[in-house]
């Protein structure tokens, strides 16, 4: 209707800005914060989300220019002006998923020992940024020795974690070989923390309800959004499903995943917002 011109205004959530193809002459971003259920507080939108929302303004072939109005707190105005008009440095987040990436390289035999792991890191954007912004990555200096020590520490901590989670084995304190859990995690693109949880909690006596509980404990569901004021809706959903949920658990994304997955199995009607979250959960659940 909006594209056909039948309606002139469309209201969309921040998440929908990534999936929608519609453009407009004017885009208004009503706020730069959202409620994070995991932290139980309002947090700023990531910069890439703000950029994505701003990108909805202007219609190529229709408008010569587009307009975006960004509404934010007065204390944030200078920050967003700087961000919009001046380039910001791009940093690596490889360290946040280092174990999963390194596990995949071990499975592919790209990394067969600890020195291979260090060499592999030197080819990454993460390595390039270490010397450019050492404070961001917790380095004390940018000399060759500082970088070498940091990479060695990262490799040691990562492979020890993978071994502890059953994803790889360390032979003679040097050689690395993939283990069964690591092979499964790499093949299905599952996080190493998730595969360890599955291995520890699932056994031959686990019933369907138990399997759903374990599935919803997966780290992949950490990103399920929990919105402000959603507790009442989730509490009502739990009651209609006959599930008992502790009050302080209603802000937990894993609890929300559990409720929406059971709602899918029981064909329980849910709101439009929850339907969007349910689709996200089902996409991950099929792979897991």
Image (cartoon, rainbow, N blue to C red):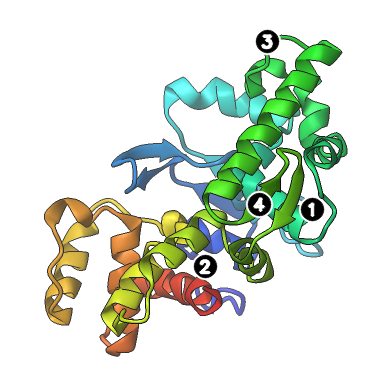
The residue wearing badge 2 is: 8
Q: Which label sits on residue 169?
A: 4
Q: CA distance from mark 1 to mark 4?
A: 59 Å
- Left or right? Give the position of 229 relative to 162: left
Q: CA distance from mark 1 to mark 2?
A: 19 Å
- Point out the frontmost of discs 1 and 4: 4
Q: Residues within 10 Å of mark 2 (few under 14, many from 20)?
A: few
- Local SS, label 4: strand
Q: CA distance from mark 1 to mark 3?
A: 49 Å
The residue that appears at 40% across and 63% down in the rendered structure is 200
Q: Residues within 10 Å of mark 1 (few under 14, many from 20)?
A: few
- Point out the frontmost of discs 2 and 4: 4
The residue that appears at 46% across and 77% down in the rendered structure is 282
Give the image location of residue 100, x and y in percent.
64, 52
Taking 14 as reference, is 233 above or below it? below
Total count of labels: 4
Q: Which label sits on residue 140?
A: 3
- Local SS, label 1: loop
Farthest residue in the front direction? Answer: 172
- Point out the frontmost of discs 2 and 3: 3
Give the image location of residue 78, x and y in percent.
56, 20
Give the mark, 3 or 4, whose residue is nearer the N terminus. 3
Q: CA distance from mark 2 to mark 3?
A: 55 Å
């Amino acid at each position: 209707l909006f594209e056909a011109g039948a309606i002139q205004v469309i209201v969309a959530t921040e998440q929908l800005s990534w999936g929608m193809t519609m453009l407009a002459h004017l885009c208004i971003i009503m706020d730069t914060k959202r409620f994070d259920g995991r932290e139980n507080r309002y947090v700023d939108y990531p910069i890439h989300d703000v950029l994505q929302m701003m990108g909805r303004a202007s219609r190529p072939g229709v408008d010569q220019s587009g307009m975006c109005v960004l509404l934010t707190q007065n204390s944030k105005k200078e920050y967003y002006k700087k961000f919009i008009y001046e380039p910001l440095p791009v940093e690596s987040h490889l360290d946040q998923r280092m174990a999963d990436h390194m596990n995949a390289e071990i499975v592919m035999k790209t990394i067969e020992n600890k020195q291979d792991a260090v060499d592999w890191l030197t080819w990454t954007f993460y390595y390039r940024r270490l010397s450019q912004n050492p404070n961001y990555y917790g380095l004390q200096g940018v000399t060759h020795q500082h970088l070498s020590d940091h990479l060695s520490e990262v490799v040691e901590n990562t492979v020890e974690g993978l071994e502890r989670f059953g994803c790889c084995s360390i032979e003679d304190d040097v050689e690395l070989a993939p283990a069964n859990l690591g092979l499964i995690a790499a093949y299905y693109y599952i996080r190493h923390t998730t595969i360890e949880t599955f291995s520890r909690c699932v056994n031959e006596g686990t019933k369907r309800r138990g399997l759903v509980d374990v599935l919803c404990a997966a780290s992949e569901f950490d990103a399920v959004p929990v919105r402000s004021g959603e507790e009442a809706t989730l509490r009502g959903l739990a009651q209609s499903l006959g599930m008992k949920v502790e009050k302080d658990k209603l802000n937990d994304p894993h609890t929300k995943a559990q409720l929406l997955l059971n709602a899918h199995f029981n064909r329980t009607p849910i709101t439009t917002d929850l339907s969007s979250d349910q689709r996200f959960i089902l996409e991950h659940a099929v792979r897991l």
